[in-house]
Amino acid sequence: MRNLGDWVSRIKELWSVGRQAEQRTEVSSADRKYQQRTETSTDFQPVAVETPWGYLLSFAVLGAIVVALYGIKANYRQTAFALTLAVCAMVIGIFLGFLFGVPRTVQTEQQPSKGADAQTPDSGVSYRANTNLEQISDWLTKILVGVGLTQLNRIPEKLGAFGDFLAAGMNGGKAERSFGILTFLFFSTCGFLVGFLWTRLYLQKEFKQADLGVLAREIQQIKSQPDKDARALSLALRQLSPTSDAPVPSEEELKQAIREASAPTRLIIFEHARNARKYSGPNQLQQVEKTIPVFKALTAADDAKQFHRNYGQLGYALKEKTPPDYQAAIEMFSQAMAIRDNLHVAGYHLYELNRADCLMKMNPQPTEQQKQRIIADLKAVQKEDPDLLGREPAINAWLSQNKVQL
């Protein structure tokens, strides 16, 4: 007996030590969970918020077991029908809970700016998150609540008819009728709570994280834009005025840098290249050729086709370089004219004059079709500036040679 008492005392002692170790483990686990939540989320939520999920899952599993046991006593077909009814009710409840729990986007009206900024085309323009889902959710919840309140007196009647419909899938008795109604109400309620809590506790957080991610990317882009502008301007200047200690950038490198640059920086680069093309000092032809990659990069960055001057200046440079590329220049002048006309910009009739000049030099003996194209360009120039053609000896010589009277 003494040995047996020693064994019992020993077992109690070991059980006490194990219980204390288990309690310490639970405390440390809770501390780690608390620390992870506070480190990964600025919107701290207590651990107790997750408790309803355990209750809901327990109730749902218990309900599914009861439904399965109720149907097993008859046959497997009725069991499958009862479980399918439970799943459908759960899904309907989750959908309704989602509709009632969709978070609302808080938006503020942007006040119009004053002063010089108010004259810019972009002032007062802002983009907001698409709230169609919120509006649909709001409409449906109001409709469901309104219709439900107006039909309260008919709910028992409709439930009875619904129970008769469900009973036909089980056994057709009164017990199955009541059981079907209870099954639907129980699982739809559980589903509603699941959908509502998930939408409120998790979907709202996901929306917020997505919005914060977009905002963070926009802020990062704004912060990095000055560096991109500086790099694009530096590469353009290196292309226009190369030095021994700085290599000339490749065309792809220049195109990528100018594409990432802001609109004001592109305008500065355009003015530098334009002034370099019009340079009339020593090595003029070499200077013209250096501007071609810059103008090509500017046209490549103009995806919206809004800046006709980029194409026009590239056409001038292609025409003036040695040897001239008249065909490419004609294409650039045509593109510049198309953009100019599409934007309803007045002037810039030198595009037609230079395109006609390129056509003349490409075709000393033009066909009738080519001649009509040249004449059309010259008439357009004459309409805009009647005195301009008189100051162009080469044009007058061509008109006399081909016996053309404008």
Image: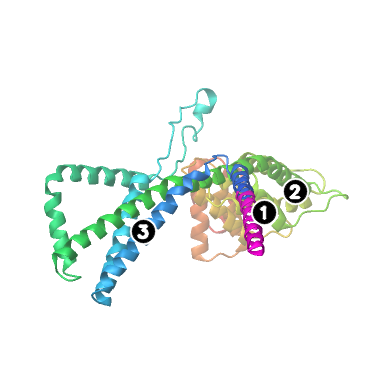
**Who's the residue at 43% across and 36% down the image?**
106
Q: How is the image coloured?
A: rainbow
In the image, is 101 to the left or to the right of 155?
Answer: right
Q: Neighbour class for label 1 at 10 Å: few (<14), some, many (≥20)?
A: some
User: Which quarter of the rendering shows the N terminus?
Assistant: bottom right
**Front position in the image: 35 or 252:** 35
**Front position in the image: 90 or 390:** 90
Give the amino acid type for the residue marked by disc 1 in the picture: Gln
On the image, the x and y values in percent for residue 240 come to 76, 47
**Front position in the image: 161 or 134:** 161
- Which residue is at the far top? 115
C-alpha gap between disc 3 and disc 2: 66 Å
What are the residue bounds of the magenta stretch?
1-26
Give the amino acid type for the residue marked by disc 2 in the picture: Leu
User: Which label sits in the foreground, 3 or 2?
Assistant: 3
- The residue identified by callout 3 is 60
Q: Is residue 166 above or below residue 263?
A: below
- The residue identified by callout 1 is 256
On the image, the x and y values in percent for residue 316 come to 65, 50
Q: Which of disc 1 and disc 2 is earlier in sequence?
A: 2
Residue 137 seen in the current view: yes
Magenta residues: mostly which secondary structure? helix
